[in-house]
Structure formats: structure tokens, C-alpha cells
Image (cartoon, grey):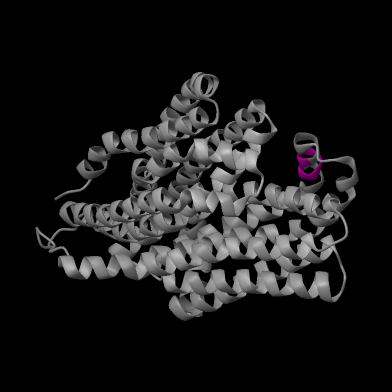
Amino acid sequence: MTEGSPAIDPAPRPAHRHRRIWAIAGPAIVANSSAPLVGLVDTWVVGHLPGARYLAAVSVGAMVFSYLYWAFGFLRMSTTGLVAQADGRDDDGQIARTLVRSLILAALIGALILLGQNQLEAFALHFLAPPADTVSLFRDYFDIRIYAVPAALITYGINGYLIGTAQTKKTLYVQLVLNIANGCLNLFFVLGLKMGVPGVALGSLIAEWLAVGVGAVFILRGIGAHALLAAVRDPETIALAKMKKLLSTNVYIFVRTLLLILVFALITRNAAQLGEVPLAASHVLQTFLMLIALGLDGFAYAAEALTGAAYGKGVRHEFRAWVMDSMAWAGAAAVLYSLGFWLFGGELIRTLTDIESVRTAALSALPVIVALPVLSVWAYQFDGIYIGATAGAAMLGTAAIAAASFVLAVGPLTNQYGLPGLWSAVTVFMVMRGLSQALWYPRLERALEN
């Protein structure tokens, strides 16, 4: 706290805190939920082309870009934390400078990826080794959609600013424009113009840049063109000392994300080693994990913005209040998830596949899936809190502990119990993420003054 500020800054009243949490979490949950619907539209559109190779090529291509975007998700996370802290201090100039730094970094990374697109494409083909009759279609898809990467990374910076300033309703609008435009354009290009796989990629490309345009409008209305121009011209914006916090936080979160990607790759690898049926069943079970993330990420976003603002002000009791209240809502949501999976999980599995052997395998792991929400919620929520505090090094360290625990557990559990054992190892990973973050949490509070 600065000299002359009050010794105790009163935290918002409980009812107000709960409304603030839902004002952020609600739109975020809706925005997250819209993304899978577009995936269903894409699958339906491509699934009507003559031959399975079209769907296979788009599936492999979409997976490449999904992992690429996930790897650079740190652009949103670090921007959210730093913007939230500046917002807590009412430092509009710092908000503008942080956003400009993030957009510059996103554009630079996007440009480097475009320069190395041939090498990236060759690596993807070598690593994934898709069937020979899909390679040319994959190249058609990749060579068009690669030009959407800078737009996606820039959108991360825009969404980081919007979430950090508790404007998640606007992130909902950005996401809806992206998803609806993507679905409509794919219908137009593939079914209307008969463009096939290139039409799917072109639809995604245009939709990504439309989302950037909508986000830019929100930024201009929120910060203003004059303030943004001033931030661009300010030497402090790109000064190395001032970029250090953003860069260091990004590096930590980037490496941490690579660890998460490694864990999910190992899940698929171990499922494949069990056989074709367990692999297919594991893919079905990942739908439950996606459903969990759709809801719990909303409360994590609320924690990013609200705890980040309190952390920026240096007010410990306000930071703790937002932590406890957002945790309570996330915990309640997790209980509802577990109850829903217990009551309807079997029906969902039977809806997702009509292959009886796959159904039986997936159902064998359902008890683990029922317990997963209440055991993993703390990992999601602490991620939001740590992002708000820009504690990137701690996020990396705790993720490394969890990943090591998974690596140690996955072999013995899978060998002993098969698919339920594999998903028990996933539960170990999530529990260790939450537990290690909980043990580190007091250090975050000690950094605050009161």
C-alpha cells in the first residue's frame, strides 16, 4: 500500500461478492459451452463429404491447432493477471501498457509461427503419422488455417484484458462471434460452395479474424484510441525491464502448459496400449473432463479477475475473501457435477457410442469419473488464483509435482486395473495439482501487507 492510504481497505460485502463472482463466471460458462457446439457442426459438415478420409484429415488438422493454441494460452493467463492487478490499483495507464505488450508479443509469436510453418507442418505429419490417403487433405487444411494463428494469439491478449477487467460478458460476445461465424461459414463453404476440406479451414480463418475485429472494438471503447496510442508511443511499454514480468510469467506458464499436454498425451498413449476398445472408451470419458472444464473454468476466471485486483492492491483480507467465496461456488458446482455424473453418466456414455464393448469399458471407469469433479475442482480454482497473483513459477513447480506423480502412478494403476486404473491416475494428477497449490498458497498471502 502507498503511504497515506488507509490501513484497512474494507472488502466488498458478501452479497456483493457473490454477485460479482457470478457476473464473471456466468458469461464465461456460456462462452465455454458454445465451443463444443461448433465442433459438432464441423463434424457434421465434414461427415457429409464422400469418404471417411475427409473427416480424418480435418480431425488431425484440428488437433494440431488445438494443441498449438493450448501451448500459447499463457498469453491470456499472464495478461489477465497483470491487468487485474493494475485494475485493482486503478492504474489505467498500466492496463493499456500491459495490453499493448501482450498484443505485440502475440503478433511476434504469430509471425514466427508463420515463418516456420513448413517445419511445423512436417513435424506434425511425422509425429502424428496420419493415413497416407489423408496427407494431401491435411496439407490443404493446414496451409490455409495456419494464417489464423496470429488472430487466435491476438484474441488471447484481448480476452486476457477483458477477463482481467471483469468484462467476461464481452468475452462471451467475442467467443459467440467466433463460434457462430465459424459454423455458418463452414456450412456455406463446404455444403454451399462444395469446397471440401479447404472450406472448413477457410471458415475457421475468417472467423478467427472476425473475432479479433470484435475484440478490437471492445478495446477501443474501453481503453480508448488515445490511451492505446499513448501506450504504444510510451518507451516504458517495450522497455526490457518492464517486459520482464510479462515474459517471465509467460515462460513459466508455457512450460507448465507443456507438462499438461504431456500428461494428456500419456493418457492417450496408455489407453492405446490397452487396446482399440479401451482407447475408444477413454476418448468417450474425455467428454466428461471437457464438461467439467466448461463449468469450473468459469469460476476460475472469476478468481483470476477478483483475486488479481485484490492482489494488485496488496489487501490480504480482501484477497482471501475472494478466494474463499469463489472456492465455495466452485465446490458447489463440483458437487452438482458429481451428482449429475452419478445419475446420468451411464446414459451419456450410451448416447455417445452404440458400440457395446466400448460402452462396457467406459462404464467400468464411471465410478472414478463420478468422483473426479469434487477431487479436481481445487486444481482448477487454484489455477485461477495463481494466475491472478501472476505466480507463474509456483504454477510450474506445482504442475511438475503433479505430472511426476502421474508418471509414477499411471503404469502400476493401468497394469493392475486397466482403464479404471488409467483414469484413477488422472485423478491422482488432478488431486496433486490442487494439493500442492494449497500447500504453497500461504506464500501468496504472505506477500500481501494486511
Q: Is residue 208 visible?
A: yes
Count of marks placed on residues = 0
- Residue at coordinates 54% horizontally, 60% vertically from top-left? 156
Q: Residue furthest front?
A: 356
**Residue 337 vs residue 325, the one in the foreground:** 337
| Residue 128 x, y percent position in the rendering | 75, 38
- Residue at coordinates 63% horizontally, 27% vertically from top-left? 274
Q: Which residues are drawn in magenta?
A: 120-124
**Residue 51 vs residue 215, the one in the foreground:** 51
Q: Main secondary structure of the magenta part?
A: helix
**Residue 158 vs residue 287, the one in the foreground:** 287
- Give yes or no for residue 378 being in the magenta stretch: no
Q: Is residue 265 left or right of residue 342?
A: right
Q: Is residue 281 left or right of residue 28?
A: right
Image quadrant where residue 378 sits: top left
Q: Is residue 12 visible?
A: no
Image quadrant where residue 6 sits: bottom left
| Residue 174 x, y percent position in the rendering | 54, 72
| Residue 220 x, y percent position in the rendering | 51, 78
Q: Is residue 4 left or right of residue 134?
A: left
Q: Residue furthest bottom?
A: 221
- Residue at coordinates 34% horizontally, 44% vertically from top-left? 374
- Residue at coordinates 82% horizontally, 50% vertically from top-left? 138
**Residue 52 vs residue 200, the one in the foreground:** 52
Q: Is residue 360 above or below residue 43?
A: above
- Give yes or no for residue 123 being in the magenta stretch: yes
